[in-house]
Amino acid sequence: GAVVSQHPSRVICKSGTSVKIECRSLDFQATTMFWYRQFPKQSLMLMATSNEGSKATYEQGVEKDKFLINHASLTLSTLTVTSAHPEDSSFYICSARDSGSAGWNYGYTFGSGTRLTVV
Amino acid sequence: DAKTTQPPSMDCAEGRAANLPCNHSTISGNEYVYWYRQIHSQGPQYIIHGLKNNETNEMASLIITEDRKSSTLILPHATLRDTAVYYCIVRVLSGTASKLTFGTGTRLQVTL
């Protein structure tokens, strides 16, 4: 089945620094990937839609200059949290769907998530 | 996409069937019902989806009412590893990848 690899799984950074999170589709191509954020005991909130070769689409209220998204290839999207602050501490999850026919049957595949702690 | 309503939590004894309901009374004719689950501190996992016929796979069964306004996910023999938050999502199935919107889900606790 489709696999999405997300790295790192856990990161601690100092306030004011930037952190990059990678999301890779290992055995399929994904023209579109999605980035979610999840706070403790809450549901997943979509942050942005990452489109290969074009600009990402951000949900209302998400600062595009703070959460930089790059989708340079059909198998890789990155999310960079710039000038991180403690309130950015959260669980970040990416997802993708196979651009081919298999995507119709198996829905969306999610990465295992990245727990970011800003101290 | 149509909104869904799920109970916030449910308990189930290990080995018994877990029946998780979902109401989607505003579902449109071309919208599918998807189920995902999220085990603690992991990314969501796809379980099953369907349009109007009942569906079964190695993980679960999906029962959709004739009027399609509600559905039930059935885990036939729940185990402790099935403890998770289960999300019911309704959306159009298309060749274009479009966003999934998660509601609050049902927190299923499987107990000994």
Image (tube, coloured by chain):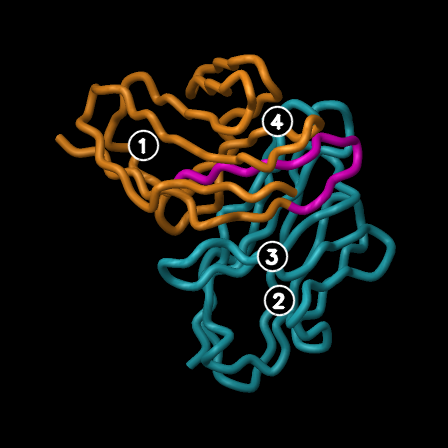
Chain colours: A cyan, B orange
Question: Residue A106 falls in which quadrant of the image?
Answer: top right
The chain carrying label 2 is A
Real-space Cα separation, disc 2 to disc 1, in angstroms: 32 Å
Q: The numbered mark 4 sits on a residue in which chain?
A: A
Measured Cα–Cα span from mark 4 to mark 3: 20 Å
Q: Mark 3 or mark 2, which is nearer to you?
A: 3
Q: Is residue A103 visible?
A: no
First to last magenta residue range:
B86-99
Q: Quadrant of residue A53?
A: bottom right
**Residue hosting label 3:** A46
Name the residue tied to disc 2: A20
Residue at 50% x, 53% y: name it: A113
- Percent from the top left, x then y, of residue B40? 35, 48
Crowding at dot 4, Cα within 10 Å, few <14 / some 14-19 / many 20+, comes out as some
Return the residue at label 4: A106
What type is the residue that disc 4 sits on? Answer: Tyr
Report whether A27 appears left or right of A41.
Answer: right
